[in-house]
Image: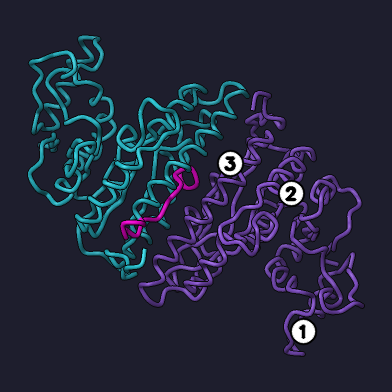
Chain colours: A cyan, B purple
């Protein structure tokens, strides 16, 4: 890392450009079926795409993939504290997420992005798994001075249940609303939202554009039919983002496993995916 | 890690016992003269000593040693933001500290201590290198439910100078006062406070006990004489702790590089070192 940081943070008092919140899905940056295994090649590629896009004002949030999820599931952390054997799982889930976060931030710094790790459990307390307290002074200062804060789904303390998992998706919606983001880019391992599960239904079509009312109707129908998510699991993730979409923040789902998609989405270039808008 | 966590946090609403704040010096847990090299053997030994002492209510803070210090020095992070080339150093110092912290917390968890990493830069903002804002909801909850928060000297944001180094010693004094600690144990790589530098003066004697007024006189004399710290560098560290000592928190300096010293200090057993008291 001989050359200077490409984005050259100026420690300026206020940034003019619009904020982008970028999610790097856990299934993209880790090897899904191998516990605690990062996908370093993809991390490097994504770091390069983000650097090449030269977005000035950005927050990055990443998921847990094969680092956080298996541990959280094994110890039932999402159910809150029930017995002492879970404590080891709570601690290990947090440590696993810190380990993954270090790799992500290292990759970003290597590509001259002024990435600074923020540990959600150090500044967030949830209540019944919803964010109750969010200390954001550090985040505000980081953004105002040109840094790129990097957060992640984390094992956090909960005022009702003792502890819980704060999903990267809830974090994204909260951050996007609080910091008045212009857009959210969800980099996941599918191409977007489908009319049916593309893995089982040959007639499934990618929806390039959907409005919030239509999205809600789709969700309602699925709930009524008491079936599993026919769209292949994306609707569950998106439901966390509804408050942000409702606040008029454009949300774009794109397949980050495919080369150049995140770059194009960041640059506002044409790319396959699903755009969700308020109306 | 088959057996249950030894200390078995009970997620109780309030803890009865007195709080101990333990510092693990950077020179103890890293190899001082080898950049980015942990002393894993010492970390494991200290984790075992802490586990064996079964202290219920504790905060651990560790220093940077050969992880944080060389980078912070090279990029002059303590001087605050002056030019863009420092930004890389600021980011790398933070990453290095997160890496060291992971090793410390892993060692503690391996010894069944319910250790939970708190990233100081995620919850503290300094002003002119002094702590200005400290978000402590997570810390309070961790302590009240039986966890052991683990913090560290960190590269933090500063409202005057852009960024700065928050020393583990300033952190310790602040935490000890805020959470009404009973005692502070400073685990360093010297035996305590000497009447002269033991490395150069054969007549230097270890002071087993010193009161705050006497400590201040000693500091004043050194300042008057315009000499470097004759006690071998310990006075500088201790000056950060004066507010805590003044708040009647007993501060005990002990050589953590020597086996069983930290265990004995935690248990309140007799051990060589320097006790500093208000009066």
- Image-based side of A159 in relation to B274, left or right: left
Q: Give residue A19's position: percent from left, percent from top.
A: 23, 54
Please tell me whether mark 3 sits on a helix, a strand or a loop: strand
Q: Mark 2 points at which residue?
A: B20
* Vertical order, A34 against B92 (above or below): above
The residue depicted at 11 percent of the width and 49 percent of the height is A268
Q: Nearer the viewer, residue B111 or B16?
A: B111
How far across and how far down the image is residue A211, in percent? 11, 32
Residue A122: percent from left, percent from top? 50, 47
The Cα–Cα distance between marks 3 and 1, rounded to whole angstroms, is 40 Å
Q: 10 Å neighbourhood of mark 3: few (<14), some, or many (≥20)?
A: many
Q: Is residue A195 visible?
A: yes
Q: Residue at x 80, y 40 (%)?
A: B53
Whichever of callouts 2 and 1 sits on the residue coming sooner in the sequence is 2
Chain of residue at mark 1: B
* Quadrant that contains the N terminus of chain B: top right
Residue farthest toward the bottom in the current orientation of the protein: B225
Helix, strand or loop at mark 2: strand
Q: Are marks 2 and 3 in contact (CB under 8 Å)?
A: no
Q: Which mark is residue B222?
A: 1
Q: Do the residues at pointers 2 and 1 share their chain?
A: yes
Chain on which label 2 sits:
B
Residue under circle 3? B116
Q: Is residue A145 found inside the magenta-colored segment of the image? A: no
The residue range painted magenta reads A109-124
For discs 2 and 1, the disc positioned in front in the rendered view: 1
């Amino acid at each position: 890392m001989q050359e200077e940081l490409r984005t050259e943070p100026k420690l300026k008092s206020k940034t003019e450009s619009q904020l982008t919140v970028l999610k790097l899905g856990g299934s993209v940056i880790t090897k899904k079926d191998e516990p605690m295994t990062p996908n370093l090649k993809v991390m490097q590629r994504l770091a390069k795409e983000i650097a090449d896009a030269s977005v000035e004002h950005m927050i990055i949030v990443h998921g847990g993939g094969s680092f956080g999820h298996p541990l959280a599931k094994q110890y039932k952390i999402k159910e809150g504290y029930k017995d002492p054997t879970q404590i080891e799982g709570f601690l290990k889930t947090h440590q696993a997420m810190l380990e993954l976060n270090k790799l992500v931030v290292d990759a970003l710094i290597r590509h001259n992005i002024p990435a600074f790790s923020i540990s959600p459990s150090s500044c967030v307390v949830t209540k019944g798994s919803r964010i109750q307290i969010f200390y954001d002074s550090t985040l505000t200062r980081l953004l105002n001075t040109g840094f790129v804060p990097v957060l992640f789904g984390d094992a956090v303390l909960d005022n009702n249940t003792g502890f819980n998992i704060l999903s990267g998706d809830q974090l994204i919606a909260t951050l996007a609303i609080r910091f008045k983001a212009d857009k959210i880019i969800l980099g996941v391992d599918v191409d977007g939202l489908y009319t049916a599960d593309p893995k089982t239904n040959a007639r499934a079509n990618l929806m390039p554009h959907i409005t919030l009312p239509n999205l809600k109707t789709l969700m309602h129908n699925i709930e009524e039919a008491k079936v599993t998510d026919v769209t292949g699991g994306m609707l569950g993730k998106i439901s966390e983002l509804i408050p942000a979409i409702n606040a008029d923040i454009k949300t774009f789902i794109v397949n980050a496993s495919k080369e150049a998609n995140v770059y194009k989405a960041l640059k506002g270039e044409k790319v396959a995916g699903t755009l969700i808008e308020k109306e």
